[in-house]
Amino acid sequence: MENIALTSSPTTPYFPEVNFDVNKGTCEISGESYMEETYKFYLPLINWIKDFTNNIKRPIELNIKLIYLNTSSTKCVLDMLEILKDYEDEGGKVKVKWYYDKSDPDMVDEVEDFEAESGIKIELIEFAQ
């Protein structure tokens, strides 16, 4: 299984930065997510999480620091959370942390919706931008 590392650039500011590390069991997504063909971008990430939870079977941590995500990105993030919830229900160790800008109370509401929809506990961590 390979790591996934994608950096954002000034020419693609609507793509998040991604760092999925198989050895550490960490998945980090940060920045903004409002690209076209969202599912095409997220499918390798979703499949990576599936592969990790099905084959590696070690503790996994998802860290999200998205300051903006569109509706189609929301669906893809929810897909990842549901995979992690299934893994947790089967006895896997999962931690999800969502970093949010303290000046954006709407993100807190959105994360609470993710938590309710997926059934997985999400730790909210405030940061100042």
Image (tube, rainbow, N blue to C red):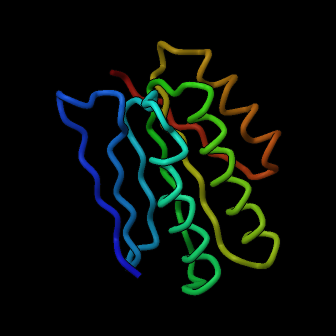
State left or right for residue 2 relative to residue 45. left
**Residue at 72%, 50% in the rendered image:** 121
Which image quadrant for residue 98? top right
Check the picture and name the quadrant holding the N terminus.
bottom left
**Residue at 46%, 27% in the rendered image:** 34
Which one is in front, 62 or 49? 49
Query: Is residue 15 shown above or below 22?
Result: above
State left or right for residue 12 relative to residue 123. left
State left or right for residue 27 relative to residue 92. left
Check the picture and name the quadrant holding the C terminus.
top left
Q: Position of residue 124 (x, y in %)?
A: 59, 38
Query: Is residue 72 shown above or below 50?
Result: above
Q: Position of residue 43 (x, y in %)?
A: 53, 55
Q: Position of residue 102 (x, y in %)?
A: 48, 19
Which image quadrant for residue 32? top left
In this view, the residue farthest toward the left is 10
**Residue at 26%, 31% in the rendered image:** 12
Which one is in front, 18 or 63? 18
How many numbered discs, if any? 0
**Residue at 78%, 67% in the rendered image:** 86
Q: Position of residue 3 (x, y in %)?
A: 34, 71
